[in-house]
Image (cartoon, rainbow, N blue to C red):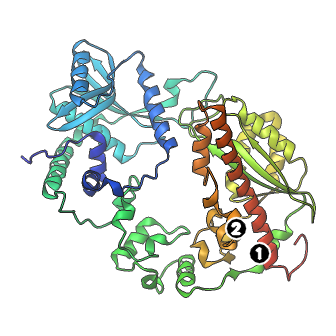
Amino acid sequence: MIENVIHLSKSKYCRAKQCKKILWLDKYKEEEKIIKASENIFNNGTKVGELARGLFGDYTNIPYNTDLSKMIEDTKYAIENKAKIITEASFNYNNNFCSVDILKNNQDGLEIYEVKSSTHIDEIYIDDASYQYYVLSSLGYNVKKVSIVYVNNQYIRQVELELNKLFNIEDITEIAKDKYGEIKENINQINLYMNTHKENNEPQELIGMQCTKPYPCEYWEYCTKNLPKPNVFDIYGGMHTDKKFEKYYEGKISFKDLQYENLNPKYLEQIDFEINNKEPKIEKEPIIELLDSLKYPLYFIDFETFQLAIPEYEGTKPYQQLPFQYSLHIIEKEGAPIQHKEFLAEVDDKDFLRHFAESMIKDIPQNGSVIVYNMSFEHSRINELGEMFPDLKQELMRINNNMVDFMPPFKNRQYYMKEMEGSASIKKVLPALYPDDPKLNYHNLPVVHNGEEASATFLSLQGKSKHEQEELRKGLLVYCKLDTYAMVKIWEKLKEVVKENNNGII
């Protein structure tokens, strides 16, 4: 039998299932880790786990202790004293530790319920729950049932939250039983791997799809640090990851390696512009068509949203994108000065969605062009608001019907520059069009620099002092204002590049 040199937990087991080198890096080179998962994702997971504890009624919780043996002792005591529902029940078998999210302690055996904040079941969740079955069964417990609890994203919150409707429960008992031998062998292999590769013997693993699935690896930058820049993984515009790895394994890694490959013309264009430092590509006809379609007043608008795994507001679903802020730049007529209006919800306003919709309708009173960047997002949010507030639907649909998207010229590569690096994101397009304007640089903003930070900042307002809230709100307003001012500047640039075709609104 292989010596168990590593203390495994269910999360460590799952990380090793993705790639065993992750555990080695965690142990010996953790400083190389780059965590990209947002705090909001972590908070959603924590809240779902805590709420799900009450799914089956009253429960006995095993409090976390750095001394895991204390948690194990407390669990044993709870089981022996016939506690019916135990949360964070903790067990250890041969250096393999796990805490079960919800454990049903029945007279004739135990039931394991693994809680996930996801809206579907991934293979890695089955591995997680099956590992727990392995540990408990190996300790001699009769595990009758293994289930995964996950979020039902079709549930619409009523006045009161209904746990039995918020969560779906799927029985995976037979799968967990079938995986027993596989998990035992995996644990042996993990221990052999860690026993073979000590601190000064770094394992050499090929990068592959395991670097991205089931989760993007935090050590990607470390493991790819010696690749030429730019490389196949820097191609944007829809190239599938498996295709990138296919080229990588063929030895086609740098852009020079790839320039004569049989690839989508979009990808070859990015490579060509980068290698040959080409001048901007501008197809004037579609740009003129877009500009000619605009009607004054021009309303440049952008939304910021957040998502909650557990819907806190009546009429909303889990993970629904909830708009809490907009910025609006307005040009009433040709040559008119730019006006700016904005809305930022109060963090304790339970009716902020209605107030958002009412404010937007008031600020967009006429049938001019409502200009956005990546229309499907704002369009969908307005449709959702229309369904929630039928009395506002007609006005909201008026705004939707007047919407014009500024992304297509860049997405379709009708306007393309090397500096856009294959991306049509406004965060790439704006600095490419205006490389020397510090006011248009998102990196120079004081508090918020992207949409993910905006969501996290708004959610963090709760519980902050008045002064702290004011500073954070100021940061949110400055960020969102730049998003719509960016569209104004893009409009000006589009007019500039086709100015010799001066017709219509141009």
**Circle 2/circle 1 CB separation < 8 Å:** yes
- Relative to 355, 37 lies left or right: left
Residue 116's place in the image compared with 79, above or below, is below
Judging depth in this view, the residue of 147 and 499 nearest the camera is 499
Is residue 409 something one can see in this rendering? yes
Amino acid under disc 1: Pro
In the image, residue 161 lies at what x, y percent?
57, 24
Tell me the SS state at disc 2. Answer: helix
Residue for point 84% across, 48% down: 398
Residue that protrudes farthest toward the top in the picture? 81
CA neighbours of label 2 inside 10 A, class few (<14), some (14 to 19), many (20+): some
Identify the image quadrant of the C terminus.
bottom right
> Label 2 belongs to which residue?
408
Judging depth in this view, the residue of 242 and 465 nearest the camera is 465
- Relative to 2, 472 lies left or right: right
In the image, residue 196 lies at what x, y percent?
13, 57
Q: CA distance from mark 2 to mark 1?
A: 9 Å
> Label 1 belongs to which residue?
286
Residue that protrudes farthest toward the front in the picture? 467
Residue for point 69% across, 72% down: 433
Total marks shown come to 2
